[in-house]
Amino acid sequence: MVSSSGQTALLLAIRGLGKTFGRYVALKTIDLDVHEGEFLSFLGPSGCGKSTLLRIITGLERQSAGTIGQGGRDISALSPAQRGFGILFQSYALFPNLTVRQNVAYGLNGSGRAAEARVAELLEMVGLPDIGGKFPSQLSGGQQQRVALARALAPSPKLLLLDEPLSALDAKVRVHLREQIKDLQRRLGITTIMVTHDQEEALAMADRIVVMNHGTVEQVGTPAEIYGHPASLFVASFVGKMNLVPGQVAGGAFRPHGSTATIAEAQGEGAARLCVRPEDIEVSDAGSGTAARVEGVEFLGAFTRLRLAVPGWGGVVLSADVAARQMRDLAIAPGAAVRITLDPTRLQLLPGGGDA
Ligand SMILES: Nc1ncnc2c1ncn2[C@@H]1O[C@H](COP(=O)(O)OP(=O)(O)OP(=O)(O)O)[C@@H](O)[C@H]1O
Ligand SMILES: [Mg+2]
C-alpha cells in the first residue's frame, strides 16, 4: 500500500526489542520496520533468534525490552488473539478429527452460508477445491500445509506469519509450494513475514530480507542488495557462494596475502577480504588474465563449478562458475592451466581479516 506521499505505509514499528532467557541473550536491540503489503523474510543460521522474534510479533512470547508499534500504539501487552495475525508453522497442526472443510472453518468467526462460501473460496485459493470432505491423514504433507495456510488466511488477517512453513516438505513440493505462496501473497497483497534458514527460499520469495546472526540484524535489503552488496563478512558468506580472498589494503590497492599483485583498487588501510561471486570470474584457456590451475571440476548441470588455485595471488583457491554453453568450448580438466579475470564492477572489499 502506497500513501499519497509515495511512502509505503508502516504496519509494524519494532523498536529496541530484546529478549533474554535467564542469562542467555536471544535478541539484542532489534529495530525493524514492516511495511504494508511487503513480503519480509527473516534469514539466518539455526539459533540466531528468528523464531523468537516471530513469536514475539505473534504475541506467543513476550519481549524483555523494547516495543512493537502498530498504528501508533504499542501492542506488546495484547494476546495473540487480540493481535489477530495469521500464523503458520512448520508442523501442519491441523485437527486430525476434523475434515479439511471443518479445519478451515475453524479459522472463521461464524457459520452458515457465508462461512461455507468463504471456506470454498479459501480452498480454491490454495488450489485444493475438491478435498473439503477429506481428513488430514488422507492428505500429503504439501496438501496439509496448504490447508493450514487456508485456515490461517480465513479471517483475512492484516499480517501473515510463517515459521519455516516449507521445511518439512520434500524438495520438489517445496519449490512448487513456495511459488504458490508467493503468488497468493502478491494477489492478496497481504503483509507476510516468513522465517527461513534457506537462503535460496528467501532470495526467491522475499521483497526484503532481514539477515540475522546471534540475535542481531546484520543487514536488511532486497534480495538483489543482499546478494550484490553484502554489508558484512557474515552476510557475504551466508548468502550464496562467495569467494573471500584475504589480503591487505595499502597505497590505494588490495593485495592478497603472500603476493605483490594488485587485484583491485582500494581506499584505506588494513586487513580486508576481497569478495567475488563464482559467476563473476571469467575463465578462459588462453589470452590475458591471471594464471590459475584447475584443481577440481564439479558438474552441476546448467553450470560447472571449478576450483582454481591462483599461485600469483598467494595460492588462494577460488570457486568459479562456467556456464554449460561456455564449458563446451573450453578444454578444462583437473590440472589444466587457465586464465582468470575478475569483473572489476562486481568486486567488493570488506574490512577484517579473521574468519567470517
Ligand atoms: N523458551 C526458551 N528458553 C530458553 N532458551 C530459548 C527458548 N527459546 C529459544 N531459546 C534459545 O534462543 C536462541 C534462539 O532460538 P530461536 O528458536 O529463535 O532460533 P532460530 O533462529 O529460530 O533457530 P532455528 O533455525 O533452529 O529454528 C536459541 O539459542 C535457543 O536455544
Ligand atoms: Mg526457528
Image: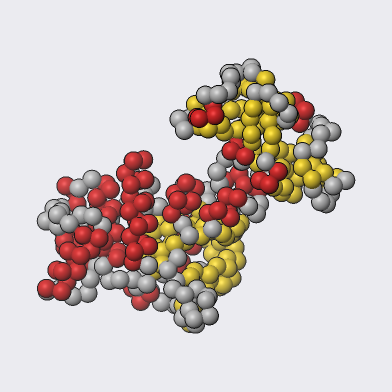
Q: Position of residue 188 (x, y in %)?
A: 33, 66
Q: Considering depth in this image, is 242 or 143 the residue closer to the camera? A: 242
Q: Is residue 157 above or below residue 287?
A: below
Q: Considering depth in this image, is 350 or 355 the residue closer to the camera? A: 350
Q: Residue at x 12, y 74 (%)?
A: 112
Q: Position of residue 285 (x, y in %)?
A: 65, 23
Quarter of the image for the C terminus: give it.
Answer: top right
Q: Is residue 335 above or below residue 85?
A: above
Does residue 315 show up? no
Q: Is residue 334 left or right of residue 142?
A: right
Q: Is residue 306 left or right of residue 187?
A: right
Q: Is residue 310 left or right of residue 141?
A: right
Q: Position of residue 306 (x, y in %)?
A: 58, 28
- Tell me the quarter of the picture where residue 170 sits: top left
Q: Considering depth in this image, is 104 or 37 the residue closer to the camera? A: 37
Q: Position of residue 237 (x, y in %)?
A: 60, 44
